[in-house]
């Protein structure tokens, strides 16, 4: 089971607004389908994502990411579920974004 957390849903809505505004509905339809397929694959094989180097050594063994175009889909998993924590552009500094997210909550 894959659960997209509310905070990640907010990230996703920002991506949607940006893509639709700058590239149009047709491109959004393509991008949205790619996100859905990526999340489907995460549900089938959560361990198949890439390790997040910024979390190495701090207990991030069950965190992974998958890239959809230029966006990282960051998730945590165990034997029962997958929690999608954020959608973050690959150009953004992950560590800074993570700390900002932690202190905003």
Image (cartoon, grey):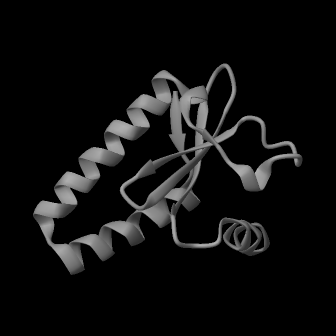
Q: Quadrant of the C terminus?
A: bottom right
The structure residue drawn at horizontal position 79% and vertical position 73%, both measured from the top left corner, is 103
Q: Point out residue 74 in the picture as x, y percentages from the top left corner.
A: 58, 50
Instruction: Please state the horizontal and vertical placement of residue 92, each as a whole percent of the image.
Output: 57, 73
Place of residue 61 in the rendered image (x, y in percent of width and height, measured from the top left): 78, 36
Decide: is 19 above or below 27: below
- Looking at the image, residue 44 sits to the left or right of residue 62; the answer is left
Residue at (57, 61) in percent of width and height? 7
Q: Residue 76 occupies which quadrant of the picture?
A: top right
Looking at the image, residue 64 sits to the left or right of residue 15; the answer is: right
Q: Nearer the viewer, residue 40 or 7?
A: 40
Point 42% across, 38% down: residue = 39
The spot of residue 31 in percent (x, y) is 26, 55
Answer with left or right where residue 69 lies relative to residue 95: left
- Give the number of callouts: 0
Q: Image quarter for residue 69?
A: bottom left
**Residue 64, located in which quarter of the rendered image?**
top right
Residue lying farthest left? Answer: 26
């Amino acid at each position: 089971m894959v659960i997209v957390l509310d905070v990640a849903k907010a990230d996703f809505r920002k991506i949607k607004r940006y893509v639709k505004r700058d590239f149009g509905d047709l491109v959004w339809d393509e991008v949205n389908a790619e996100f859905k397929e990526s999340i489907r694959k995460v549900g089938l094989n959560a361990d198949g994502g890439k390790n997040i180097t910024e979390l190495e050594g701090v207990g991030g063994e069950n965190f992974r990411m998958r890239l959809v175009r230029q966006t990282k889909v960051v998730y945590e998993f165990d034997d029962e579920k997958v929690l999608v924590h954020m959608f973050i552009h690959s150009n953004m500094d992950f560590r800074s974004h993570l700390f900002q997210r932690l202190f905003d909550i």
